[in-house]
């Protein structure tokens, strides 16, 4: 069998979980991952054949790269984006420039007016999805600009 990592030919590979995939690895490479217990073979009740000869048993197919279901983490990614220090002011200024009331903006965001007011006062940090919506609707940027090296002019 061939090791899926280094390609070495070994008599026996082990199933090893590495990152999010399961590989058949030689003992050398196996230590980089987590060993998985061998899959219990769906063998029927022991077939003892006279003469000690066991009919060809295909244990595993090396071609079978099994696609595992991605275990999606359920934590919500709220507040991943880094916002500009005056993000809430930018929202209010942009909204007022468009002559939208907090209510109008709220409707466009599918949020309540009170949410808009909380956002504008800075007491509620909108989740990233909302940040993007606001940026899109108001045509502004709320995210902190990545600091350009040596751009400290003025
Ligand atoms: Zn290897």
Image (cartoon, helix red, strand yellow):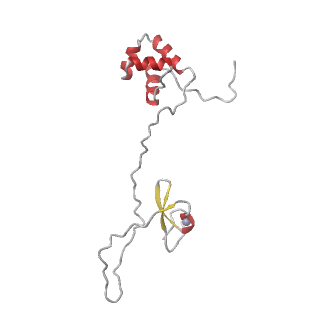
Q: Which image quadrant for residue 46?
A: bottom left
Quarter for ligand 1?
bottom right
At 69% from the left and 23% from the top, the residue drawn is 152
Query: From the viewer's perspective, is 22 left or right of 46?
Result: right
Residue 52: x %, y % from top left:
36, 87
Determine the residue located farthest toward the bottom in the rendered image: 51
At 50% from the left and 74% from the top, the residue drawn is 11
Q: Which image quadrant for residue 148?
A: top right
Can you see residue 6? no
Query: From the viewer's perspective, is 1 left or right of 148?
Result: left
101 up-or-down from 72: above or below:
above
Can you see residue 73? yes
Residue 33: x %, y % from top left:
53, 59
Residue 149: x %, y % from top left:
67, 30
How many discs mark residues in the rendered view? 0
Determine the residue located farthest toward the front in the rendered image: 123
59 up-or-down from 66: above or below:
below
* Nearer to us in this view, 95 or 86: 86
97 up-or-down from 1: above or below:
above
Residue 123: x %, y % from top left:
49, 21
Quadrant containing the C terminus in the rendered view: top right
At 52% from the left and 72% from the top, the residue drawn is 10
């Amino acid at each position: 069998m061939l090791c899926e990592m280094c390609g070495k030919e070994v008599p026996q590979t082990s199933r090893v979980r590495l990152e999010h995939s399961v590989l058949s690895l030689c003992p050398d490479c196996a230590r980089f991952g987590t060993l998985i217990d061998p899959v219990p073979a769906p063998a029927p009740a022991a077939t003892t054949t006279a003469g000690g000869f066991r009919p060809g048993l295909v244990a595993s197919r090396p071609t079978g790269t099994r696609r595992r279901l991605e275990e999606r983490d359920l934590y919500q990614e709220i507040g991943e984006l880094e916002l500009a220090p005056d993000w809430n002011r930018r929202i209010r200024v942009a909204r007022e420039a468009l002559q939208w009331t907090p209510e109008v903006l709220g409707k466009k965001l599918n949020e309540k007016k009170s949410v808009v007011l909380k956002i504008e006062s800075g007491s509620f940090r909108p989740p990233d999805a909302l940040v993007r919506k606001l940026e899109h609707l108001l045509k502004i940027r709320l995210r902190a600009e990545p600091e350009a090296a040596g751009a400290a002019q003025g």
